[in-house]
Amino acid sequence: MALAVTLLNSTCLRSRCYRHKVLQPLLGTVCVDSVSKCSSSYRRPGSQPEVIPSWRNIDFSFKKGFNALKTQLGLLKKETEDHLVGPDGHSFSQYLLEQTKVMWEFRTQEDLNKWVISSDVEIGGKSEVYLKLGRNNQGAMLYGILNTEVPRDGETKYSGYCSMRAKPAVGSFARKKYYDWSNFNCLYLRVRGDGRAWMVNIYTDPYFSHQKDDLYNYFMFTRGGPYWEEIKIPFSKFFLSSRGRVQDDQHPIWLDKISTLGFTLGDKVDGPFQLEIDFIGLLNDRAHTEEFAYETYERNPRI
């Protein structure tokens, strides 16, 4: 009898956890920590089990839930109005005649909060990376120390990288949102580097689940020195890779399903680095007519 009661309680608790997980976009931060603890049974070896059940720590507030719902409905209303007006809230005539567009600029701390930095510390490395506003709040400064020393774990073979990536856009009710860059054909940046070569990464929406690690890359060479430089990279130059390996089957970027963009440094040169970024924009260069720079293969060749 006691065993049956225990099983029923655990089943009821698990169902409550999953219900709160469904309502997480509405509840916001009301029960995020509790849900993460409640829906996961993992416990680190040597740690003591929790005496108080995690579901008792849920601070459910109807006021917070109502405010979150009100905010999400406001975002949905704005998205609907922009959709009725035209792409990105602009008229179709303005959208078709648009030649340049600034996607990211760095002037305040809120602009920096839209980006995430990471390094090989996640796999046991010793590289360091930091992000802050530049002088006079003019641009973002990405700096740190690159260290290619391989961690002594017996598994990792390579190390030494630092990266910076924009957070994916999110719509109302935590929906995935994508950028439509099909009206442009070049990426336009204003940067000031120290002479190192960076990798520019563009992430798209994967059509299948096994394509979640696919991304498009191209190199960005900085010349160093005290002067800013403007770099134009055509989208036709980006090549497809997956988990660090260039793919044999190449195809152009799906510009209407852009998820996010990032930069990676991994030139295997130990020492300090620095990259300043003023803005990241898009350009429609009418003189550039190349569709794709690499050889493609016919998927179903005729015999």
Image (tube, grey):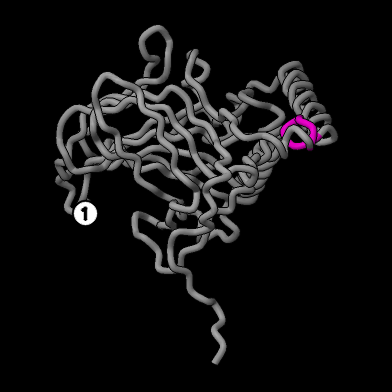
Q: Quadrant of residue 220?
A: top left
Residue density around tag 1, few if under 14, some if 14–19, many if 20 or more, within 10 Å: few
Q: Which residue is pictured at 14% across the width and 46% down the height?
A: 152
Relative to 111, is 148 on the left or the right? left
Is residue 86 visible in the rendered image? The answer is yes
Q: Which residue is mark 1?
A: 155
The vertical placement of 281 against 207, above or below, is above
Which quadrant, please, contains the C terminus?
bottom right
- Count of labels in the image: 1
> Image height check: is 228 above or below 100?
above
Image-based side of 117 in relation to 22, left or right: left
Nearer-the-camera pick, 261 or 64 = 261
Residue 52 lies in the magenta stretch: no
Observer-nearest of 44 and 300: 300
Question: Start and end of the magenta stretch?
Answer: 86-92
What type is the residue that disc 1 sits on? Answer: Glu
- Name the residue: 46% across, 64% down: 250
